[in-house]
């Protein structure tokens, strides 16, 4: 099953589910058994956020992925709700969503900044296995989304894209890169040499 975005590209939802389930099994072994949060839990969530001083970073896009990751890493227990609680939809007409505006270099710049901040946070508070899993996901999914739009962007965008990707790759161990699909490895190699991956 694939979720299809504009231009016919998609995300392999089954593989994503396998990855999430693997991560959940890991954490389930390390933490108490999961329970469903009753509906009135919102005040507890807010108190948790205040207690650990979580704040959305200001003045940038992708601030939500930073806060959500911090909350999960700092939580003593994470409850799993098996029902779908969030749907993403592609906006048609007008301005696209943040996810759809991949040809805006500021969008990509903020995404790399957010992913780097998440890596730094996990390195300080979480296990190394979680950091490596995040870096793998960032390279396989988050940053790779932008590669499909390289034919729609300027040369200046491509040049900055290569610099930003190279900067992110500097902090990623080789073993994380080796686990990527061959096309991803080639794309990131090309970006690291200053050549556009598309």
Image: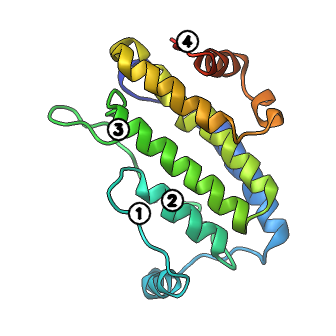
**Residue topped by disc 4:** 195
Q: Quadrant of the N terminus?
A: top right
Task: Choose the circle earlier in sequence order: 3 or 4.
Answer: 3
Task: Choose the circle earlier in sequence order: 1 or 2.
Answer: 1
Which of 65 and 44 lies nearest the eye of the viewer? 65
* In the image, residue 21 above or below residue 15: below
**Residue topped by disc 3:** 106
Residue 129 in the image: state x and y as whole percent: 80, 53
Residue sitting at x 64%, y 57%: 120
Image quarter of residue 108: top left
The residue positioned farthest toward the left in the image shown: 94
**Residue topped by disc 2:** 66
Task: Choose the circle earlier in sequence order: 3 or 1.
Answer: 1
Q: CA distance from mark 1 to mark 2?
A: 8 Å
Q: CA distance from mark 4 to mark 2?
A: 29 Å
In screen coordinates, is 183 left or right of 164? right
């Amino acid at each position: 099953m694939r979720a299809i975005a504009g231009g016919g590209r998609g995300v392999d939802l089954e593989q994503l589910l396998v990855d999430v389930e693997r991560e959940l099994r890991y954490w389930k072994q390390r933490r108490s058994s999961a329970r469903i949060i009753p509906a009135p839990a919102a005040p507890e969530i807010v108190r948790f956020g205040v207690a650990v001083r979580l704040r959305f970073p200001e003045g940038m896009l992708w601030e939500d992925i930073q806060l959500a990751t911090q909350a999960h890493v700092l939580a003593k227990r994470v409850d799993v709700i098996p029902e779908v609680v969030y749907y993403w939809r592609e906006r048609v007409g007008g301005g696209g969503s943040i996810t759809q505006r991949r040809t805006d270099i500021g969008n990509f710049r903020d995404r790399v900044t957010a992913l780097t901040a998440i890596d730094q946070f996990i390195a300080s508070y979480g296990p190394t296995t979680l950091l490596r899993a995040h870096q793998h996901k960032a390279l396989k999914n988050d940053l790779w989304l932008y590669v499909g739009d390289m034919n729609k962007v300027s040369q200046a965008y491509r040049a900055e894209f290569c610099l930003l990707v190279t900067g992110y790759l500097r902090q990623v161990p080789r073993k994380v890169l080796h686990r990527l699909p061959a096309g991803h490895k080639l794309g990131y190699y090309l970006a690291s040499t200053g050549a556009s991956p598309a």
